[in-house]
Amino acid sequence: MPLSSAQEGDPVTRSDTVHAQQADTLELGKTWSEGDAMEEKGAKIIERGEKLVLNGEKKIAKGKGLVRSGTAEAEVQEANYMRMVRTMGVANTPKQLKKELKTLSAITEKWDNGVDQSKRGEKLIKDGEKEITEGRAKLRKGNSMVLRGQGQKNAVETQIRSEDAKTRVEIEDLDPAVKTQGGR
């Protein structure tokens, strides 16, 4: 305990004790505030983690929808191509041949679009999975910070209650009238 007015070997005065208690109280207040700040920061990290998980889930759902519709479109166009191939080669005029080529080109374009759509969906799914992983990591970190901050605050509060009880006992020992007045 630091002594303000007493030198080594001098008796400790009430003033010295009060100064030491005030310094301890300031340190406890600082420790409690640090715990509170840690808890608040953890809560913000949790919030960001929840948003990442939610956004990741949305991306996965959208990606799965794109994969389903893209795959379905590609399968339809593949079936159209197979039907077209069976009827091709019967063109008797350049105009009929151009019509076959135009239809074949449209099938090819739609088929490619379906495949591309499926690939975009697969990428969204992977991106969503990454966001969920990142979000869960933030949730773990945030929860840990909240718990550590709460623990730090609780430890300070417990110490303060203990010191308050000790001080009440000391006062009661010094002044018996406090006991008869129903002191705490």
Image: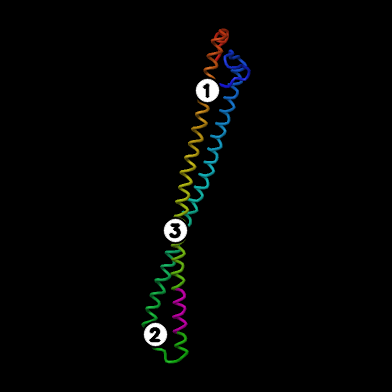
Q: Residue furthest front?
A: 8
Query: For mark 2, what is the residue?
Result: 88
Q: Is residue 146 magenta?
A: no
Q: Which residues are magenta?
A: 100-110
Q: Is residue 19 left or right of residue 48?
A: right
> Dot 3: within a 10 Å radius of its alpha carbon, few (fewer than 14), some, or many (20 or more) residues?
some
Q: Which residue is mark 3?
A: 126
Q: Amino acid at mark 3?
A: Lys
Quickly name the residue at label 1. 161
Q: Amino acid at mark 2?
A: Met
**Left or right position of 12 against 140:** right
The alpha-carbon separation of the residues under discs 2 and 3 comes to 41 Å
Asked whether 152 or 135 is in front, the reply is: 152
Q: Secondary structure at mark 3?
A: helix
Element at label 1:
helix
In the rendered image, which quarter is residue 126 located in? bottom left
Where is residue 56 drawn, in percent x and y?
Answer: 47, 54
N-term-proximal mark, 3 vs 1: 3
Q: In the figure, is residue 91 to the left or right of 40? A: left
Residue occupying the point 47% across, 40% down: 144
Identify the main secondary structure in magenta: helix
Q: Tag 3 or tag 2, which sits nearer the N-term?
A: 2
In percent of width and height, residue 21 lies at 58, 21
Question: How far is the residue under mark 1 from the one under mark 2?
Answer: 92 Å
Pointers 2 and 3 in contact (C-beta within 8 Å): no
> In the rendered view, would you say 65 is above or below 163?
below
- Residue depth check, mark 2 versus mark 3: number of the one nearer the observer: 3
Q: Secondary structure at mark 2?
A: loop
At label 1, the amino acid type is Arg
